[in-house]
Image: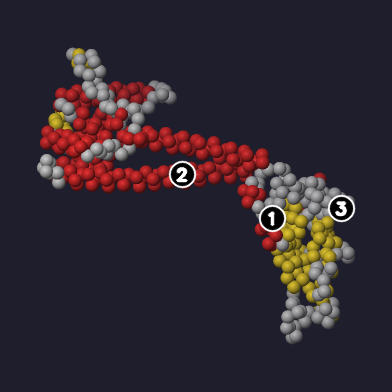
Amino acid sequence: MKINTMLPRINKNENMSISKKIFWSKFIIFFVSFVGFIGAIITIYSYFIQQRNTKLHYEIISNTNILDIKADASQFDILYDGKSLKATNENVRIISFRVINVGNTDILKTFYDDNDPLGFCITDGILLKKPEIYETSNQYLKDNLKIFSDSSNKVTFSNIILEPSEYFILKVIIKYNLETSPSIQPIGKIAGIKSIQVLNKEEIKETESFISIVFSGGILVQLVRGFGYTLILIFMVVIIIILIIAITEKINKKKRKKLVNYFKVDPKYSYNKMDDAIFNRFIEEDIAILNIMKINITSEKVLNLRYKYAIIKEKKERKYQDFAHRTDIKPIFYKRRIDKTLYIIGKMITDGLVIKEENKLKINNSMKKTLEQFISFLSENNYQNQDNFMTGEVDITDEVKKEKMI
């Protein structure tokens, strides 16, 4: 038997719930791709913007006198080699400083000049003992760094590999005259370094500019940093989008609930408790799904015809899926679809708008009347789908075409 009936096509404003999901999934995919692209550009730019430079700092961590002789400390004194420092107007100072590679390249052993080794000398003071290695940033420095000192207050280091951000800390004990101020003076020559700066704590903070902090590190550091920042940004944006959607949806539901309450007190309408299923569906999913339901229940003949065709199509798709699974044929274009018509009819059966008796569907005429009356009420009040800006041309029904064999 051939059916020459063309069922009505669902217009684009009746596809909200599915179109909204499609819109947001496409939007998130596009946004994630865009942010990833920007993150990659920033990472590449941050790497190439860096000029390869070799830089070494001596950073003063602490600079402390053993005794403040200028203070009222008449009961205290310091003896060195059996002599009173107070009597000779002298004091002892302990200076701790860090030797750190603040550049972005390794300082290799070949960078040192053997005729002018790296180290420091004491000005306006006398080195009381050989400096101690107080701390190192890695085991290599701990095992290989050697300290050499002589009677001329000159201290030198063995040639060691110093990678970016690696360091070692020295503790120096100095005797000095109170009329002078002892200091550390760098000595030695390293290829690529014109001069070595000695900085105190305050100066260290000032020299760490925002750009140097952001773009510090090698290519691996920049790649990991860029990837991490991109993931964090994507996560934050997704959270913001989810919050915006949730808040917007909550506001829209509140508006729809208010409209339902207005309709319930409309003199033209006589409230029935089973109609709450229609109202709840409207509150949760907006008007589009009500319009689809209204079209589906135009007549029982149309409804059953569409339902039978949807079942046939569903069975065909299941067969294809089983065949693909058995033969291990999984075309890239194949995607299991849940029939949209069965989905809508399932909702109508759940709501009581349609009653299923064996394989035949019957329309609940009382609820059908309420549905039509409610849609008419919304139209009279100029209510429109609150998500129209997101809806597109997505066919959510399987229409029975002319001369289709049942």
The secondary structure type at the circle numbered 2 is helix
Left or right: residue 115 compared with residue 262: right
Task: Give the Cα separation between the discs numbered 3 and 2.
Answer: 56 Å
Placement of the C terminus among the 4 image quadrants: top left
Query: Percent from the top left, x then y, of residue 159?
Result: 80, 51
Residue at 38% over, 34% down: 23
Residue at 25% over, 18% down: 401
User: Do the numbered discs 3 and 1 sit on residues whose CB atoms are within 8 Å?
Assistant: no
Residue at 27% over, 47% down: 254
Earlier sequence position, callout 3 versus callout 1: 3
Judge whether 310 appears above or below 122 on screen.
above
- Which amino acid type is marked by label 1? Thr
- Which amino acid type is marked by label 2? Val
13 or 318, which is in the foreground? 13
Query: Percent from the top left, x then y, of residue 139?
Result: 70, 54
Judge whether 308 appears above or below 27 on screen.
above
Earlier sequence position, callout 1 versus callout 2: 1
- The nearer-to-camera label among 3 and 2 is 2
Disc number for residue 237:
2
Q: Mark yes or no: residue 199 visible.
A: yes
| Residue pointed to by mark 3 | 116
| Residue pointed to by mark 1 | 207
The secondary structure type at the circle numbered 3 is loop
